[in-house]
Image (tube, rainbow, N blue to C red):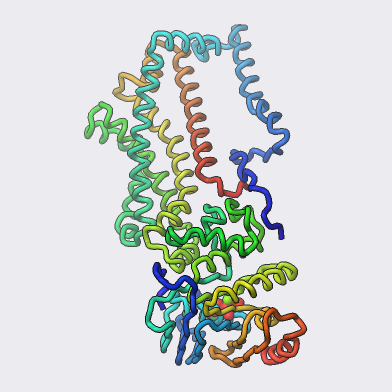
Amino acid sequence: MSAAPVLTGPLTATGVPIELRDLSAAYGERVILQDLTLSIAAGERVALVGASGGGKTTLLRALAGLTSTQGTLRIGTGAPVRTRVMFQEDRLLPWLGALDNVALGLPRPDRFRAARALRDVGLAGRERAYPHELSGGQRQRVALARALAHRPDLLLLDEPFGALDALTRADMHALLDTLLTDTGATTLLITHDLEEALKLTDRVLLLADGQIREDLTVALPHPRRRTDVEDLRAHLERLLH
Amino acid sequence: MTVGARSRERARPEVQAAGTPSRRPGRAWQGEWIRWLVPLLVVLGWQLAASTGLLNPRVLPAPSAVITAAWELARSGELGRHFLISLQRAGLGILIGGGLGFTFGILTGTFRAANLLLDTTFQMIRTIPNLALIPLVILWFGIGESGKVFLIALATFFPVYLNTLHGVTGIDPRLTEMARVYGLSPLDTFRRVTLPGALPGVLVGVRYALGISWLALVVSESFGASSGIGFLAMDAREFFRTDVIVLAIVIYALIGKAADALVRTLERRLLPWQVSA
Ligand SMILES: Nc1ncnc2c1ncn2[C@@H]1O[C@H](COP(=O)(O)OP(=O)(O)OP(=O)(O)O)[C@@H](O)[C@H]1O
Ligand SMILES: [Mg+2]
């Protein structure tokens, strides 16, 4: 549950299991999550979809320990868990260059990972660029690199490519697909894009009325093409509307 | 998506005064001398009016007379002496007032308890005009140096305090939250997020403080002083030396301009990440 960094730990993240039972969250009188029950295995890649305002970000914030909840919320098996969030906005520090943004919070001996993460997202050569000198898609790639450089046990992505055009999105999907395969972290991806959910993750959760309404396993090999997931997309589309 | 593009360009080639139209980099030199055209014409006209006897030197001396006065005072070393003592008073006052303003601005911006405890008091003191304090300051400090420095420190405290506080509270809370999620300690969060985030505000405060410090200097040197640019002007008044009075005014103007240029240089150096409007 803690978002504290783990300075010593395995070199490669193995991912942590998540156990939610009767989890509820509310803003004042407004109930957002109601008795939500869900378990996710260590290293699993899960997508969370649902209507806007349905509480997806609230659930993600609960997992990151940023929102108070009632009920059972267990992450990991007791050891401190390294959780990293890629927020709905890039949340880069405007006064730091790309590399320093990625290295933020990394212990000194791990700084080298920042440069590698930046290279992994295709931004080698832009290390010194300030956020305002980067395009929207580049900024989101820096934010992604920042989340990955920490080798999180739990990776929470809140509509990471929400603001991108279709072409850039397609590029980013291919990128994220390989990067996620490499990390091994338990991953929760929030998205409005059903195709994105079905291509990148192995399990799609539909959040509605504060509960997990649908739990769909996607047992297809990666990388997936659009046509591979067409039927599942149509199925989810019907459930959503 | 371009990958591995060229190294970044200088993002902020020039910090511009409000109202100055933005210049194209290629023709920057053209705008440079135009700025001085009007002041130059004014001085020329002024000199002409004085030379032709249109202007009574008792009212306003000719620019050439001011220059002569400056030359004479500079040669005797008097100008340098008065100038340095004024600079020293202003510098010390700004250092004390600005330093305290910055410290308290950070404190009240960061800690709710400090804000509740202190901010109302500061806001109340702020509304008192500095001039109203002069009799009290003379009683407290006499007419020596400390009273002058006190007045300048008091005057510069508030712009730095208010703008630092504003800078700290204006930081996007989502950035602070991000820092927490990414494992930064409170001290690191302060160093990496709060301080750089508040810096533009702090510099705005410093700019105001520099401007107002000269105002406070004029006030504080116009009573019980035996040195400084303000004294030079007051002394000259006794002898109807309008040339020296105008010289003092010109010096104030030049120093104000230099102070402004200093802050702009600081801004360019310290805030390379700011998007120029
Ligand atoms: N800080 C807050 N205070 C009060 N209400 C909030 C707050 N944050 C979110 N809400 C409300 O909680 C509900 C769920 O918000 P949440 O951000 O979890 O939705 P979401 O599923 O992520 O939506 P979107 O897809 O648009 O991002 C919304 O109705 C929203 O208005
Ligand atoms: Mg959301």
Q: With A49 as the anchor, is B104 left or right in this view? A: left
Quarter of the render that holds ligand 1:
bottom right
Front residue (pair B216, A7): A7
Q: For residue A201, what is the image quadrant?
A: bottom right
Residue situated furthest right in the rendering: A227
Q: Nearer the viewer, residue B95 or A127?
A: A127
* Residue pictured at 59% horizontal, 87% vertical: A205
Against B241, residue A167 (above or below) is below
Q: Position of residue B107 (x, y in %)?
A: 34, 54
Q: Position of residue B149 (x, y in %)?
A: 31, 32
* Whether residue A74 is situated above or below residue B188 in the rendered picture: below
The N terminus of chain A - image quarter: bottom left
User: x, y (%) of residue A54?
Assistant: 58, 83
- The image shows residue A223 at horizontal and vertical percentages of 69, 79
State the quadrant of the C terminus of chain A: bottom right
Figure label count: 0
Q: Is residue A222 left or right of residue A77?
A: right
Residue B129 figure quarter: top left
Instruction: Tell me if residue A202 comes above or below residue B53 in the rendering.
Output: below
> Considering depth in this image, is A189 or B177 the residue closer to the camera?
A189
- Residue A136 drawn above or below residue B61: below
Residue in the image at 50% along x and 84% along y: A42
Residue at the image point whose x is 77% and y is 84% from the top: A227
